[in-house]
Image (spheres, rainbow, N blue to C red):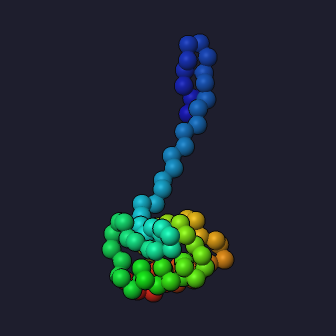
């Protein structure tokens, strides 16, 4: 985009970033999972809590967007697949 500024032209670039909006947000505090947005079965929360306690994950967050995209924050990468399997295993 080129904008006229006085007698000179200034070229500008505008970037728009779209972040996926999470339909479900699960927080882990002291190893216990709690759904703070959306709905998740008690069994999924229990299973996530079990994995987090076993792997000593004290504080983390899980975002699930429409279409099933899962983003994990505060969970070591080596445990991502296990947590994703638990989250996607039940409604």
Of the pair 33 and 89, the residue shown nearer to us: 33
Location of the C terminus (image quadrant): bottom left
Left or right, 64 with respect to 73, comes to left
Location of the N terminus (image quadrant): top right
- Residue at 60% x, 76% y: name it: 56
Extreme-left residue of the structure: 39
Q: Position of residue 90 (x, y in %)?
A: 40, 86
- Residue at 50% x, 83% y: name it: 50
- Residue at 56% x, 13% y: name it: 6
Q: Do we see residue 71 in this rendering?
A: no
Q: Please, is residue 72 above or below residue 10 in the view?
A: below
Q: Quadrant of residue 36?
A: bottom left
Q: Quadrant of residue 53?
A: bottom right
Of the pair 29 and 48, the residue shown nearer to us: 29
Q: Please, is residue 37 above or below residue 80 in the view?
A: above
Left or right, 86 with respect to 40, comes to right
Extreme-front residue of the structure: 30
Q: Position of residue 68 (x, y in %)?
A: 45, 75
Q: Position of residue 8 (x, y in %)?
A: 61, 17
Q: Quadrant of residue 82?
A: bottom right
Extreme-right residue of the structure: 78
- Residue at 64% x, 71% y: name it: 76
Q: Position of residue 87 (x, y in %)?
A: 46, 80
């Amino acid at each position: 985009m080129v904008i006229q500024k006085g007698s000179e032209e200034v070229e500008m670039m505008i970037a728009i970033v779209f972040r996926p909006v999470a339909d479900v947000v699960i927080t882990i505090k002291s190893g216990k999972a709690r759904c703070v947005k959306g709905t998740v079965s008690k069994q999924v929360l229990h299973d996530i809590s079990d994995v987090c306690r076993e792997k000593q994950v004290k504080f983390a967050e899980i975002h699930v967007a429409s279409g099933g995209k899962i983003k994990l924050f505060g969970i070591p990468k080596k445990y991502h697949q296990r947590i994703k399997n638990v989250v996607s295993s039940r409604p």
